[in-house]
Image: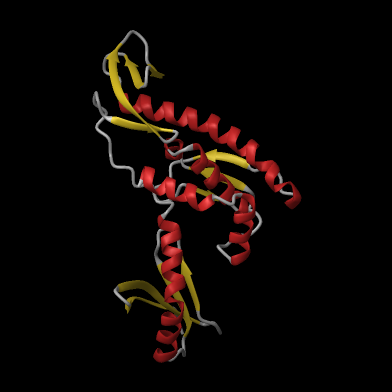
Amino acid sequence: MSETTTIQSFAFGSKEINYELSFQDRKTLGIRVYPNCKVKVIAPFDTPDEKLYSKLREKAPWIIKQQLDFLSYHPLTPPRKYVNGETHLYLGRQYKLRIEKAAANEVKLFKGRLLVLKKENTSPKNLLTDWYREKAAIHFEDTLKKVLPLFARYDISEPELQIRHMATRWGSCTTKGKVILNPELIKAPKGSIEYVIIHELCHLIHHNHTKAFYELQESIMPDWKKWKERLENTLN
């Protein structure tokens, strides 16, 4: 038999959970939640409907928790217009934007403002984007070196750090040990940046959000929940 896929949904309390259902030639039923919050259910061809729905109801709290965990990493900063007086974030603090014409392009913090000096026909958005990325590369690397000794007992190598825009995540890591961080994270408080980096380093040891993963994260950063909340409140 060939694989069949349909889109289904079921109600759990006041919440409706949508999922992609695939029937395959396999022995066990699996449920996966992806970083974009999509749910995929993979079941054996002969799975009875009642068994399928019973398993979904049983796993509903876990599905919702996984979706909420992933949502906390979704950058939702509203789009900017890049005009004078507009508020922009850097390391958790708000700065009013000041754009001035100049002979050379430059971005700097000056007297509590985010000052953009730009040549004629130069996009302030592009200048700010480049400035944020440059600051992110420096600060993220410094923070990684600061927190890595906390993992000394786990004998992990210093991971390669990559800065890359991600539409739905603040950070991620690969099975080969690369840590990827969203440059937008440079707008968050320093403690929140540490939290995201520690979160990803924990994934080098425990690859899923298991009990062991959260116990490790708690041992490394006992106040991680505070900084996770700060991250959500500042940038969402």
Residue lying farthest top?
103
* Left or right relative to 150: residue 30: left
Q: Position of residue 206 (x, y in %)?
A: 63, 59
* Left or right relative to 30: residue 21: left
On screen, 45 above or below 172?
below
Q: Residue at x 44, y 39 (%)?
A: 188
Answer yes or no: is residue 35 visible: no
Q: Residue at x 38, y 43 (%)?
A: 234
| Coloring scheme used | secondary structure
Q: Residue at x 39, y 65 (%)?
A: 38
Quadrant of res 50: bottom left
Q: Nearer the viewer, residue 120 or 132?
A: 132
Q: Position of residue 118 (x, y in %)?
A: 32, 16
Q: Position of residue 136 (x, y in %)?
A: 49, 33
Quadrant of res 103: top left
Looking at the rendered structure, the number of numbered marks drawn on it comes to: 0
Q: Residue at x 61, y 39 (%)?
A: 144
* Left or right relative to 28: residue 110: left
Answer yes or no: is residue 196 visible: yes
